[in-house]
């Protein structure tokens, strides 16, 4: 799929080079995560697992001082695009490699930070991939994970059901026909499909294929994620998202509670406001220091 439709397609991206450590970035506004006793490495080794077309890998490469980024993906088309784009931008601290996340356990290497956003939920067994990445994380290291929310993707589920029921093909013509079908249904009053039409990815062929034609998609709730973290021996730190208004007030109201209790409170909040994590859950966790 990603050989035919590299994702995401991008031409320009906002780059702001920072000369700050990991802890300085993550503990300051607007992220403001409590990293407790975390000590930032001088030159962090960072793994971006599932880098796609490179846009994700650029963020840690320019965000954290003296970062050395290894970015892996299965798709050669995506990696080629990533290498061309980063070369044009003059970014030289990213090494792009073709690799399968599930086979990374064979490498004799560990990382200070691992980022894997929008990838594990497309694996046959997301927990296996999560466990493999945990094994690659240094003691005391940080991990950023991005996973789809079941509650926030009801519109996507409705779209995927239409693809299946009408046997739309993942070709340019098939995607266009499917989109028109969905638009027509939305105009007739289907609220879920109206919500789907408002997603930016719906209006781009490659992105739409990833959105509703993907052959494999898992979705989660925060109780399941909490269970994963407990089994893997990882500590939930906090979400990285745009905390403003009611969202910021809620976050402040549970500040200081144990990690498991905060996740439970976030779960309850999401059940009342299911669009809270409409993009996906993006959260930081930490491997205990030996």
Image (spheres, rainbow, N blue to C red):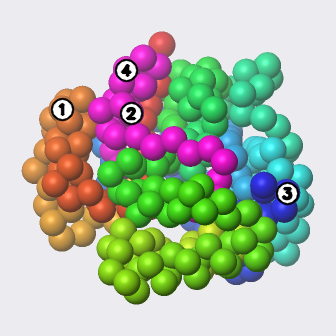
Dot 1: few (<14), some (14–19), or many (≥20) neighbours within 10 Å? few
- Report if the CB atoms under discs 2 and 4 are less than 8 Å apart: no
Mark 4–mark 3 distance (CA, rounded to whole Å) = 35 Å
The residue that label 1 is drawn on is 261
Mark whose residue sits in front, 2 or 3: 3
The answer to if 278 sits in the magenta stretch is: no
- Report if the CB atoms under discs 1 and 2 are less than 8 Å apart: no
* Residue 85 rendering spot, x and y as whole percentages: 82, 70
The answer to if 216 sits in the magenta stretch is: yes
Question: What label sits on residue 225 in the rendered view?
Answer: 2
The residue segment tinted magenta is 211-239
Identify the residue at image location x=42%, y=35%.
Answer: 285
Mark whose residue sits in front, 3 or 1: 3
Q: Residue furthest top?
A: 290
Identify the residue at image location x=41%, y=26%.
Answer: 229
Q: Earlier in the sequence, mark 4 or mark 3?
A: 3
The image quarter in which residue 175 lies: bottom right
Dot 4: few (<14), some (14–19), or many (≥20) neighbours within 10 Å? few
């Amino acid at each position: 799929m990603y050989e035919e439709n590299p994702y995401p397609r991008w031409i320009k991206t906002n780059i702001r080079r920072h000369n700050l450590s990991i802890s300085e970035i993550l503990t300051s506004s607007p992220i403001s995560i409590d990293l407790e006793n975390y000590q930032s490495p001088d030159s962090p080794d960072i793994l971006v697992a599932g880098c796609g077309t490179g846009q994700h890998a650029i963020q840690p490469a320019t965000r954290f001082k003296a970062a050395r980024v290894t970015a892996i993906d299965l798709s050669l088309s995506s990696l080629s695009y990533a290498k061309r784009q980063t070369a044009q931008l003059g970014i030289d601290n990213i090494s792009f490699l073709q690799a399968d996340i599930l086979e990374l356990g064979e490498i004799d290497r560990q990382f200070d930070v691992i980022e894997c956003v929008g990838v594990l939920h497309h694996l046959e067994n997301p927990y296996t991939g999560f466990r493999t990445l945990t094994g690659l994380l240094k003691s005391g290291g940080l991990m950023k994970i991005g996973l789809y929310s079941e509650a926030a993707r009801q519109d996507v589920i409705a779209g995927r059901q239409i693809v299946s029921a009408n046997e739309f093909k993942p070709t340019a013509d098939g995607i266009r026909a499917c989109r028109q079908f969905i638009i027509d249904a939305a105009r007739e009053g289907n609220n879920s499909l109206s919500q789907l039409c408002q997603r930016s990815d719906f209006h781009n062929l490659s992105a739409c294929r990833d959105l509703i034609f993907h052959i494999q998609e898992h979705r989660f709730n925060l109780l399941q994620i909490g269970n994963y973290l407990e089994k893997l021996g990882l500590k939930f730190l906090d979400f990285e998202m745009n905390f403003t208004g009611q969202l910021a007030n809620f976050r402040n109201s549970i500040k200081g509670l144990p990690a498991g209790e905060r996740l439970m409170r976030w779960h309850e909040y999401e059940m009342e406001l299911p669009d809270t994590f409409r993009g996906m859950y993006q959260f930081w966790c930490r491997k205990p220091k030996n």
